[in-house]
Every structure is written in structure tokens, then in C-alpha cells.
Image (cartoon, rainbow, N blue to C red):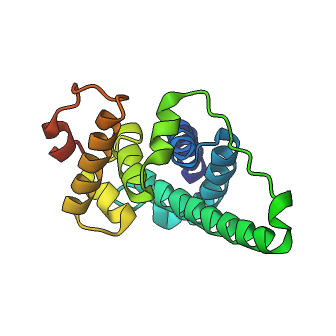
Amino acid sequence: MADDDLADFCRDVWPRLVGSLSLYLGRRDLAEEIAQEALVRVCQRWRSVRNADSPAAWAHRVAFNLAKSHFRRESTRRRVWARAVEPARIVHVDQVVGIATRDALQSLPPAQRQALVLRYYADLSVRDVAALMHCPENTVKTHTRRALERLRASGLLDDDVEESDITEDVG
């Protein structure tokens, strides 16, 4: 029976996990890879994960930690590459992203981007996001408010999103 629960959980959490990571990372292929690794870790620890307050939040925490590790490795790789290659030979190719939303999300600071994606795309409560990000709930609300302000200033977001949407806990 536990195997059926695990399979159902993985099937249910997969789309939102990949979607959250796609928005955070800006690359669906990488998001799928990281989501898959996160679900492997869920499977390895299923006995304890299934008893957590929010197994989906636990899976998102693992996935975002893996994504942050990826960013650190890429940053290191770029620094090493820049030192190893003549500056004139380094070619920076910006990945063309077809969706303005994804571009705007990528321009946000990582903490604001993470809070916004987890709150509005992953539909996690303020409490779950705070636990995932290891910060107080008010910090999550502040990150979310500032991210929405930046999106409004860029012209991407209408004033339809109310301030109460930011501070309410929909958990």
C-alpha cells in the first residue's frame, strides 16, 4: 500500500514541481532533471516524508536546494572558464526565453523569485514557504510584496493582485 501512496504522490507533485523549478531556473530541461532528482530523494526517504506536515513542501525544499547547488556549480564553472580562456575568446550567449514572464522572473533577486514562485505557482502557504526558505513568515511576505512591486514597475503585472493576496495564508 505504501508503494501506491508514493506513486500517487510523485504523480501529483511532478507537474507543480517541474513548473516551479522551470520558473525559478528559466529552463524546463534543467527543471525536469532537478525535479527527478528531488523525487528520487523523496522515494529514498518516503517513510519519513509521508508523515511530514507537508510532503509537497518537503519535495519543493529538496528541489530548490538542488537548484541552488546547480547555480553555485555553474557560477564556479563560469569563473574557472573565464580565468582559463582569453577574454577575447569568451562568448556570452544569452538564452532566448520566449515568455516575458520568465524573463521578468529571472530579473528578480533569487529570494524574491523563490518566494513568488512557491506562493503563487506552487500554491504553498506562507508558513510552508517560510519553512522551506528557512526564514520568518514576514520575510516571505516582504519578498513576495517586493517581487510583485518590481513586476508591476516593469509593466508585466497589472494592479489586479491585491495586497491582501500577499499577506493571506492560503495554506
Count of numbered marks: 0
Q: Is residue 162 left or right of residue 86?
A: left
Where in the figure is residue 22, as x and y percent of width and height? 57, 42
Residue at screen point 59% across, 43% down: 26
Determine the residue located farthest toward the left in the rendered image.
164
Q: Give the quadrant of residue 37.
A: bottom right
Depth check: 5 or 63 in front? 63
Q: Is residue 50 visible?
A: no
**x and y, in percent, of residue 49 in the image:** 47, 62
Query: Which of 155/49 is in front?
Result: 155
Which residue lies at the image location 80% right of the left edge and 68% below the top edge? 81
Q: Position of residue 160 (x, y in %)?
A: 22, 25
Please identify the quarter of the rendering in which residue 158 is found: top left
Counting from the top left corner in percent of width and height, residue 149 is at 26, 42
Left or right placement of residue 129 versus residue 75 in this view = left
Looking at the picture, tell me which residue is in the foreground, 134 or 47.
134
